[in-house]
């Protein structure tokens, strides 16, 4: 065991040494630093999205989902006044505000399906990669493929029905919007409490002294706010999928005319930036480094989280075992990448950053992703039950 831990430390030390070179050359080193802090928080506090959602949907254990609501509440308190007031003070900030549309419904639903069947989301995949879980490097590769394919079809989704955009932070007086935001969160919190209380008779407390989840959500809300101030937009992840995909097409000289995609025309300036000048890429790389550092200091994955991840994977994999894990992971990674880019983001950009920006599309994303995840879990258990009955 000691040898394994030493190898991990050597690995992380090598990455950190390379990071010094990156920081010296990065146009936005603060984004790299913020990403490192995000990774440390995710790994140290065993925070995530996919497993917390599974616990709520399958087991009626709602502690994790309630921590997400608290994250949205803390984030809203920071973001709403900032988005409404800072531009008038000459500070350029804009929230993750996108229109409601069929692309959000379909993309988030597909992302939820993939998230259930692979056992992770985008930030969770980065976390698993940082903790040296080789399986998720394959998942990430196919997320890049799926996200790039979605970018190539942007004109198709642009022609789908769109119902306009609305942000409670900027389209209402920010204090009224914030009050509405908190009321909705409180109602959902009460609903989750009722669900767990009805199932078990007791509820796992979230509010208590030195609560690790309380501290985690507070840190994540503050870090996202610092990203907003540093890059003028909230935390995002899914942009890296088409960004890396286009870079791969160029590097390998593949016969793909990506320059003529509608997506490329809309994002010409961002696509032309080098990786060291791209804030989202730097934040994502920083998260990998932060997870690796926390992982090494812990001496490996936190046992409870590793057990939870195993339960999630086992829950959804039983009926699909014959397909082969590699094939399934590749397919679901592609689905997640496609869904994230189509729906304006993953659990980070489409859910967390969107909702704390007051954007109504963030709530639509959440409902669609939860529906997709629920459908995948239901079908998985149904197929498993049918196969068991045939024995």
Image (tube, helix red, strand yellow):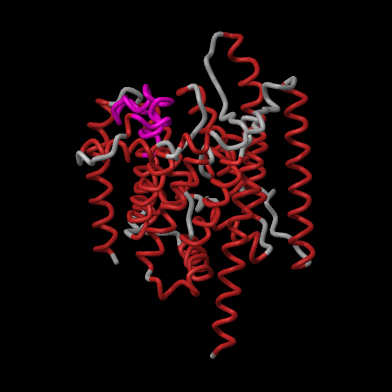
Residue at 27% x, 62% y: name it: 4
Q: Main secondary structure of the magenta part?
A: helix
Q: Is residue 269 above or below residue 143?
A: above
**Position of 162 compared to 195: left or right?**
left
Can residue 36 be seen in this snapshot?
A: no
Q: Residue 219 at x, y = what percent?
A: 54, 38
**Numbered range of the magenta stretch:** 260-284
Up the image or down, 301 lies above or below 158; here it is below
- Which is nearer the eye, 33 or 270? 270
**Residue 343 can be seen, yes or no:** yes
Query: Residue at coordinates 65% horizontally, 29% vertically from top-left?
Result: 164
Instruction: Tell me, yes or no, whether the highlighted magenta stretch contains residue 281.
Output: yes
Rendered location of residue 374, percent (x, y):
62, 60
**Is residue 318 or residue 100 the one in the foreground?**
100
Q: Quadrant of the C terminus?
A: bottom right
Q: Position of residue 280 (x, y in %)?
A: 41, 32
Residue at 56% across, 88% down: 390
129 with respect to 82 (left or right): left
- In x, y percent, where is residue 271? 35, 28
Taking depth in this image into account, of 169 and 294 the one nearest to the observer is: 169
Quadrant in which the N terminus is drawn: bottom left
Image-based side of 383 in relation to 281, left or right: right
- Pick out the residue farthest to the bottom: 391
Q: Toward which corner of the image does residue 242 lie, by quadrant?
A: top left
The quarter of the picture where residue 168 lies is: top right
Magenta segment includes 361 = no
| Residue at screen point 23% across, 39% down | 17
Residue 28: quadrant of the picture = top left
Number of marks in the rendered image: 0
Asked if residue 75 lies left or right of residue 223, the reply is right
Q: Up-down: is 85 above or below 139?
A: above
């Amino acid at each position: 065991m000691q040898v394994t831990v030493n190898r991990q430390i050597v690995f992380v030390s090598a990455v950190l040494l390379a990071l010094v070179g990156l920081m010296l050359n990065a146009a936005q080193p603060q984004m790299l630093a913020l990403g490192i802090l995000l990774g440390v928080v995710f790994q140290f506090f065993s925070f995530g999205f996919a497993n917390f959602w599974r616990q709520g949907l399958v087991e009626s254990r709602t502690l994790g989902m309630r921590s997400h609501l608290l994250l949205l509440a803390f984030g809203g308190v920071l973001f709403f006044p900032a988005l409404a007031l800072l531009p008038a003070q000459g500070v350029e900030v804009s929230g993750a505000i996108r229109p409601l549309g069929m692309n959000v419904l379909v993309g988030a639903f597909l992302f939820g399906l993939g998230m259930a069947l692979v056992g992770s989301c985008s930030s969770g995949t980065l976390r698993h990669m940082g903790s040296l879980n080789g399986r998720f490097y394959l998942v990430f590769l196919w997320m890049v493929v799926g996200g790039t394919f979605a970018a190539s079809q942007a004109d198709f989704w642009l022609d789908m029905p769109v119902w306009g955009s609305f942000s409670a932070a900027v389209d209402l007086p920010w204090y009224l919007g914030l009050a509405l935001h908190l009321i909705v969160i409180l109602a959902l919190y009460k609903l989750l409490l009722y669900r767990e209380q009805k199932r078990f008779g007791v509820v796992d407390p979230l509010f208590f002294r030195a609560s690790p989840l309380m501290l985690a959500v507070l840190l994540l809300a503050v870090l996202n706010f610092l990203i907003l101030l540093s890059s003028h937009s909230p935390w995002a992840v899914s942009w890296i999928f088409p960004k890396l995909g286009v870079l791969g097409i160029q590097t390998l000289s593949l016969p793909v005319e990506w320059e003529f995609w509608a997506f490329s025309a809309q994002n010409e300036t961002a696509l032309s930036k080098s990786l060291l000048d791209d804030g989202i890429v730097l934040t994502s790389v920083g998260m990998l480094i932060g997870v690796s550092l926390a992982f090494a200091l812990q001496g490996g994955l936190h046992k409870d989280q590793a057990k939870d991840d195993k339960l999630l994977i086992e829950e959804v994999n039983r009926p699909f075992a014959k397909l082969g894990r590699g094939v399934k992971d590749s397919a679901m990674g592609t689905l997640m990448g496609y869904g994230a880019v189509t729906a304006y983001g993953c659990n980070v950009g489409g859910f967390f950053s969107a909702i704390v920006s007051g954007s109504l599309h963030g709530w639509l994303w959440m409902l669609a992703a939860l529906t997709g995840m629920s459908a995948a879990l239901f079908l998985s258990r149904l197929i498993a039950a049918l196969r068991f009955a045939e024995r």
